[in-house]
Image (cartoon, grey):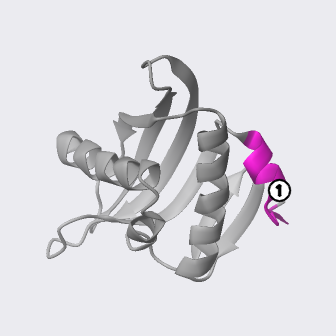
Amino acid sequence: MTQSLTQFLTSLSHAFCTDRLEYLAQHVTYPLPLYTRGELLVFGAPTALIEALGMYRKAAHDADIEKIVPRVIATGIPHKGYSNLWVEWDHFDASDNLICTSQVRYAIFHDKMALHPKIEMVDYTSMAFPEVSESLPLLQSA
C-alpha cells in the first residue's frame, strides 16, 4: 500500500512542479480543511485551492525548487476506506541539493472503485514556505 501511495503522491508532486495545479485540485474532496500554524483554512471549491497552490508554487519557484519528493513516514490503519498518512516532502534544487522539507499529515479516502485516493484533510506540521501560509486568510481554529 505504501508504494501505491508514494506513486500517487509522486504524481501530485510532478503536477505541482509542472504547473498542472488543476490536476491536484481533482484529487481532493470539498470542502477541504487545511491546518497550518495551529490555524484553519477551508477551501470550498477547486478555484480557491488552485489559487493557494499557485502562491505555494511561486514561493517554490522563487526558492529555485525544481523537484519535490514525497517520503511516506507512516500510514494509519485503514477503516472503511479512510486512513491517515504522514508524509515528509523534500524540496530539491536543480543540482539535487535539499533545500527544505515540509511535514504533512493527510486524511485520505480510497474508494475501492477509484484509481487514486482522495485527500480529505491536510495538516501541515511543518511548512517549507511559512510565508505562504502567512499570506493566506487563515481562520483561528482554537
Callout 1 amino acid:
Ser
Q: Is residue 136 magenta?
A: yes
113 to the left or right of 124: left
Above-or-below relation of 40 to 90: below
Residue 68 percent coordinates (x, y): 44, 37
Q: Does the magenta stretch include residue 73?
A: no
Please give the name of the residue rendered at 41% of the width and 53% of the height, measured from the top-left corner.
18
Q: Which of 110 and 67 is in front in this view?
A: 67
Residue 100 percent coordinates (x, y): 59, 26
Within 10 Å of disc 1 (Cα), the crowding (few <14, some 14-19, many 20+) is few
Please give the name of the residue rendered at 64% of the width and 36% of the height, measured from the top-left corner.
128
Q: Residue furthest bottom?
A: 45
- Residue annotated with mark 1: 135
Q: Count up the numbered dots.
A: 1
Please give the name of the residue rendered at 75% of the width and 41% of the height, measured from the top-left corner.
130
Please give the name of the residue rendered at 27% of the width and 68% of the height, measured from the top-left corner.
80
Q: Nearer the viewer, residue 131 or 112?
A: 131
Residue 70 seen by the camera:
yes
Residue 85 percent coordinates (x, y): 40, 47
Residue 126 seen by the camera:
no
124 to the left or right of 20: right
Q: Quadrant of the C terminus?
A: bottom right
Please give the range of residues in magenta.
130-141
Residue 57 percent coordinates (x, y): 58, 51
Quadrant for residue 48, please give it.
bottom right
Element assignment for label 1? helix
